[in-house]
Amino acid sequence: MVREALDLATDAGDPVLQSRAGAALGEAFIDAGDSSSAVEALEAAEAAFPSDGPRAVQAEVLTHLSRAYMRINDPRRSVEAADRALELAEALDLTRLIAEALDNKGSSLGYLGRGKEAEALLEGAVKVARAGGHVAAEIRALTNLGASVDTATRGLEANRASAQLARRVGNASLARWAEDMIRWFAYAVGEGWDEAIDSGLAQVADDHARGVGSAFDEARTLGFIGYSLIARGQPIDEILARIAELVPRIQDPFAGLSLTSLRGEQALFAGDLTTAVRLGVEVSLVDEPARMVFASTASHAAVAARDRAALETLLAVAEGGPTGGYRKAVSAAIRASLLGVDNRLEEAAVAFREAVALAQAEGEGFGAGRVALDGFLLLGPNHPVSRELEGVARSVFEKCGAHALLAQLDGALARSGVAVSPR
């Protein structure tokens, strides 16, 4: 229907109506996960806008265009479009567009490594949206704030607030997005995995039964819970096959990248270290906002393979990511691993202690456990610091039921001749 309205406006030679319809079409493309088509529609709408046209329409087009640029990982153009939208929206006191443009700009600045500015703008977006009663804008800003704040625990809290608000007002699309982010942060924090997995599988089944939900929704949900299932040692061949079916229907590159990352994790626990390292490094080198998460995940396979070259590559990816505590924690863990691979064990022991503490400070409980496991494997069970690292790793893995990782830990102990207590 929106496409038909755009065609009618174009045929009628009405540039203002054409821009209005283009803005609506672009927003629809964004919500459907087709960000490239959104950019195309919105750039055409902007180009068609007459110099004497209503500024409120222009502000709408620019706000959506900023969001579309953000979604195709073009943060600089997103910031530029947001600034233009804000100048117009402020003059007209269009509080919904002000909130949305602040949200877009804040998220894009986060991609550019300007984390403190990003968080301040996103908090401002929440405040403006809430004061103006713009619930959808508030929900979206809360969700993006959750992805930009400095710790995983704060991210979990922000997305819980977002999901609760979305459910209360009946916005199923935004609720679904926030609930998926809750599943991801539950994985990162190392808590609530049962609920995350069960609710995710139930959501996908319900969507199928009712014929709702997009391909991107399903791939995102399955991808996020897939990491937890792999860590638990549960088979996910069917899930990976389903994501692979969905990827060609999804414009957003994240779906395909997360599938590659998941296949790397699966190969790690299957003992195919060559494939695990290759896929992990491959996905980490793609210029995508999640590349630092992919690099952190891939580093564990590089440790298992004692692959120094891969660790150096992943360290470069991490150090080139957005500034902030998460980058510091990931970089510290990879540096500690390099010391361990080089057999500089006393330096590595100190570095692993520091890296675990940094991950814990970021609320990355599960990440701290994996870093501790890497340290334990590289230092060896008989090193004085290894028992401390074992205790951290075991506590985390037992709490979230990460049986595949517990098996790695117990296997290393058994190979060293250290008795493993029955569990």
Image (cartoon, rainbow, N blue to C red):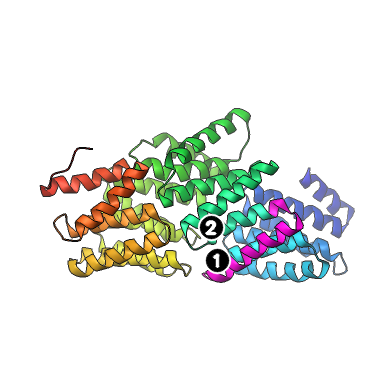
Label 1 sits on residue: 110
Mark 2–mark 1 CB contact (< 8 Å)? yes
Task: Give residue 285's quadrant in the image.
Answer: bottom left
Residue drawn at x 44%, y 37% is 239
Q: Is residue 415 above or below residue 346?
A: above
Mark 1 residue type:
Gly
Q: Tell me which numbered mark, 2 or 1, is placed earlier along the sequence.
A: 1
> Distance from label 2 to label 1 (Cα)?
9 Å
Q: Is residue 314 left or right of residue 120?
A: left
Task: Give residue 295's quadrant in the image.
Answer: bottom left
Q: Which residues are magenta?
A: 109-137
Residue drawn at x 32%, y 39% is 233
User: Which of the pair 230/325 is nearer the observer?
Assistant: 325
User: Which of the pair 160/97 is nearer the observer?
Assistant: 160
Task: Indicate whether residue 182 is drawn in magenta.
Answer: no
Q: Is residue 229 visible?
A: yes
User: Which of the pair 280/129 is nearer the observer?
Assistant: 129
Task: Indicate whether residue 124 is drawn in magenta.
Answer: yes
Label 2 sits on residue: 147
Mark 2 residue type:
Ala
Say how many tags the image has.
2
Q: From the top left corner, tell me how far across and down residue 162 is, in percent.
A: 61, 50
Residue extending farthest left: 417
